[in-house]
Image (cartoon, grey):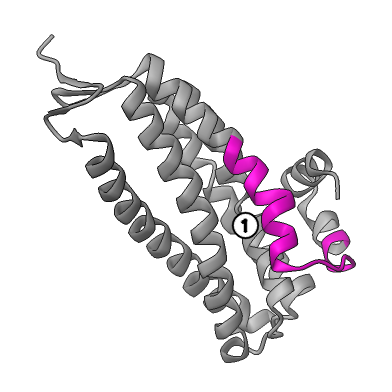
Amino acid sequence: MNILNRVKGIITQPKQEWNVVAGETTTLSGVITAYVIPLAIIGSLAAFIGYGFMGKNVVLYRMSGIAWGINMAVVHFISVIVTVIISTFIVDMLATSFGSEKNMNRSVQLVAYSYTPFLIGAFLSVIPALAIIGSLFGLYGIYLWYLGLGPLKNTPEDKKAAYLIVSIIVLIVVFFIISAIISSIMFAILGLGMYGGMGGSINFS
């Protein structure tokens, strides 16, 4: 699998690309190492550069400095990897409840490749003020997920909407929980705080 071709295909020609994916033989670890990790690394580097050297004002507080860059990079990387893995297990576990095929390898393909717009949007973190726009790219992933349910999970047409809604809720909840946990750990390690700490300052200008 060529990662650039996969990104281009899943974004621009999702229906055709899902059929290609359905014909591939892969594993959970294979998708994580060959696809998710490389994209997560690039997003993390963007976050490190953006928050480490440019920074972002949040109300009266400025998130800026090397410590903030490290924090945002690590939180993004770990959150993405863990979210994809946990979501894959949950999506696969729920499969039979929605008349779908229970297959871990297909589940990780569905989760990881549908996550592509969010992973690409994370590149905008290189300019922190645009990070929220990058996050909104993830909304396109909902459509991709819907299209992938048939080819990958053999989900009946009348069960797709329900399976999609439950799966997306699971992914969002898992991501925010993992992000919160990792953020708390990194805040403690790096000495960051809401109103002070390494690399941060209160800005009244």
Q: Find numbered disc 1 in the image and state the secondary structure of the residue it sits on.
A: helix
Q: At which x and y percent is residue 151? A: 79, 71
Residue farthest along the front direction in this orientation: 189
Category of crowding for the residue at label 1, using alpha-carbon neighbours closer than 10 angstroms: few (below 14), some (14–19), many (at least 20): few
User: Residue at point 57% right, 58% down?
Assistant: 142
For disc 1, the marked residue is 143
Could you tell me residue 3's position as x and y percent? 79, 43
* 179 horizontally vs 27: left or right: left
Residue 19 lies in the magenta-colored region? no
User: Looking at the picture, does residue 78 appear above or below residue 159?
Assistant: above
Query: Where in the figure is residue 148, as x and y percent of width and height?
Result: 72, 65
- Does the magenta-highlighted stretch encompass residue 26? yes
The answer to whether 196 appears left or right of 63 in the picture is left
Magenta residues (range):
20-41
- Outermost residue to the top: 205
Give 158 or 88, whichever is nearer the viewer: 88
Q: Is residue 144 left or right of residue 86?
A: right
* Quarter containing the C terminus: top left
Q: Quadrant of residue 23?
A: bottom right
Residue 167 in the image: above or below residue 84: below
Q: What is the total number of numbered labels drawn onto the structure image?
A: 1
Q: Is residue 155 depicted above or below 40 in this figure?
A: below
Q: Where does residue 29 sit, x and y in percent of width and height?
A: 70, 63
The residue sitting at 71% across, 81% down in the picture is 103
